[in-house]
Amino acid sequence: ALASATESIFIGNSSRAAGDSQTNQVVIAGTEGVGNGSNTTTIGNSSTTGTFIPAGNLTLTDGNLIVASGHGIDFSATTNSSGTMTSELLADYEEGTWSPVYAPATGAFAAITMDVVYATYTKVGRQVTVQAWIRTDNLDVTGASGSVFITGLPFLSAQRDSGVIGLAANMVNHPSELVVTTAGTASISPLLRYTAIAAPTNLNVTDLTAGATADQNRLQFAMTYFV
């Protein structure tokens, strides 16, 4: 069909290259197979519903396995748990950085300069794990009140009360542990603190160290939640 497609193999009724001046491609289909360009191999056509390897392993000596959006690795052949299984498709993996920021429950800080030492995330399926080390270099709490939140989660949470481990310093009473819950948004809310062996209380705007002093309100934490 395209005589200028050279050094290629086309097997199947009307199988062909995708365009002129292409080279080194293999197209195998029962009918109407169309290649994907030079230096590619195409098996099947738009009506193909599956490609099977009866035995042995599929080995990639270089390159990546690229999966279309909304698809993934199907583990339906594995044994199910005793619970109610809802999905066995691993459809997403992602890693990167995010931008955590302190925020008040009411109003807004008149000024805030965040110092993000690190803030990374890894997403596997619906499970997201974030970690961060943050602090302020300048904070003016004028106009802000109520509990303290952290905004900027890389994905919206699907539920409340996800688990968090955190350590803080430079705050009133120097809380040594923080427990953080999510609220179905892109925020960690509110920050809870222990000032003694007692029930936790919300970390309030007035507990933060205000002023133009570097490396205040330090917080390191890690959290796993679901989207």
Image (tube, helix red, strand yellow):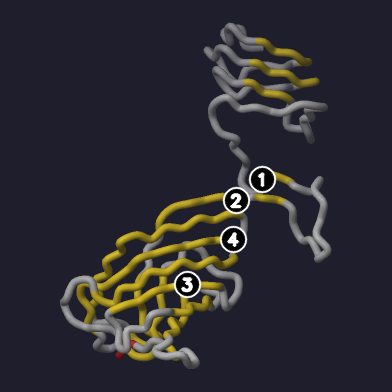
Q: CA distance from mark 1 to mark 3?
A: 31 Å
- Amino acid type, residue under disc 3 in the picture: Ile
Report the quarter where the N terminus lies.
top right
Q: CA distance from mark 2 to mark 4?
A: 10 Å
- Amino acid type, residue under disc 2 in the picture: Asp
Residue 125 spot, x, y in % from top left: 62, 55
At x 20% / y 75%, what residue is drawn? 138
Answer with mark 2 or mark 4, whichever residue precedes in sequence.
2
Element on which disc 4 rests: strand
Answer with mark 4 or mark 1, whichever residue precedes in sequence.
1
Tell me whether circle 2 and circle 1 mark residues in contact (CB < 8 Å): yes
- Amino acid type, residue under disc 4 in the picture: Gln
Residue 50 spot, x, y in % from top left: 78, 34
Q: Please tell me whether residue 215 is drawn above or below residue 174 in the rendered image.
A: above
The residue tagged 2 is 92
Report the quarter where the C terminus lies.
bottom right
Element on which disc 3 rests: strand
Residue 214 spot, x, y in % from top left: 19, 72
Answer with mark 3 or mark 4, whichever residue precedes in sequence.
4
**Few, some or many residues within 10 Å of mark 2 (<14, 14–19, 20+):** some
Residue situated in front as seen by the camera: 55 or 160:
55
The residue tagged 3 is 165
Tag on residue 129? none
Q: CA distance from mark 2 to mark 3?
A: 25 Å
Q: Is residue 227 left or right of residue 87?
A: left
Q: Please tell me whether residue 127 is drawn above or below residue 31 in the rendered image.
A: below
Residue situated in front as seen by the camera: 195 or 132:
195
Q: CA distance from mark 3 to mark 4?
A: 16 Å
At x 31% / y 64%, what residue is drawn? 116
Which mark lies nearer to you, 4 or 1? 4
The residue tagged 4 is 127
